[in-house]
Amino acid sequence: MPSRLLTLRAVCRLLAVSADEVWAWVEAGTFPAPVVLPDGRDRWSAVAVAAWQAELGRARRRRRGRAVALDDLKPLARDILQVLREAGGEWVVKREIAARVGNDGGSESGAFKRALKQLKAADGLVEADPQQGFRAVGPQGEGPGAGPCEGP
């Protein structure tokens, strides 16, 4: 049974992008090329588009869980991580973390929320629980304050 074919308009609606965006992806080789019908019209295989979407989702999940170098963390995120590490694996609530890092905006400030989001997205640095708060998990990593001091 042949695959269902989609028009450019249907692909654009499905992906919520413009026709120019679809053609740019095709030219860059990042999106399936269309099937050209005998009358010269372009159509996309619904199966190929669905497979592209599935791969895109897998790639996003892989990126979300990637390891993050401590140097790549925002300063506030590093401060929060340090507070959590000092807690020795115990759960710490957001208000307490904000107070310990001296965040003037408190636990509801945008910068604080973004820093926590960055830490949660990093693979294996912190664990979050809606009831208990946050705690450091996994390896200490590399970077300032992460390992033993080396003397001369």
Image: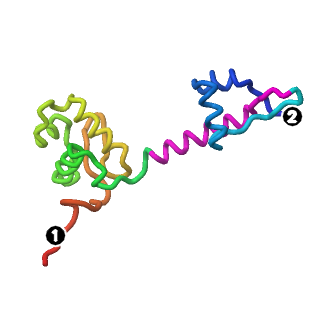
Residue 46 lies in what quarter of the image?
top right
x then y, percent, for residue 98: 15, 37
Residue occupying the point 14% across, 38% down: 96
Measure the alpha-carbon separation of dots 1 and 2: 66 Å
Q: Which residue is tagged 2?
A: 1
Vertical side of 40 occupied by 56: above or below:
below
Task: Classify 10 Å Cα crowding around label 1: few (below 14), some (14-19), many (20 and above).
Answer: few
Q: Quadrant of the C terminus?
A: bottom left
Q: Choose mark 1 or mark 2, whichever is in front.
A: 1
Of residue 45 and residue 9, the one placed in the foreground of this image is 9
Residue occupying the point 62% across, 35% down: 24
Specify whether 25 is left or right of 61. right
Task: Classify 10 Å Cα crowding around label 2: few (below 14), some (14-19), many (20 and above).
Answer: few
Which span of residues is magenta-colored?
40-63
Residue occupying the point 55% across, 44% down: 58
Which kind of residue does numbered mark 1 sit on?
A: Cys
Which kind of residue does numbered mark 2 sit on?
A: Met
Residue 20 lies in what quarter of the image?
top right
x then y, percent, for residue 97: 16, 40
The disc at residue 149 is 1
Query: Disc 1 on helix, strand or loop?
Result: loop
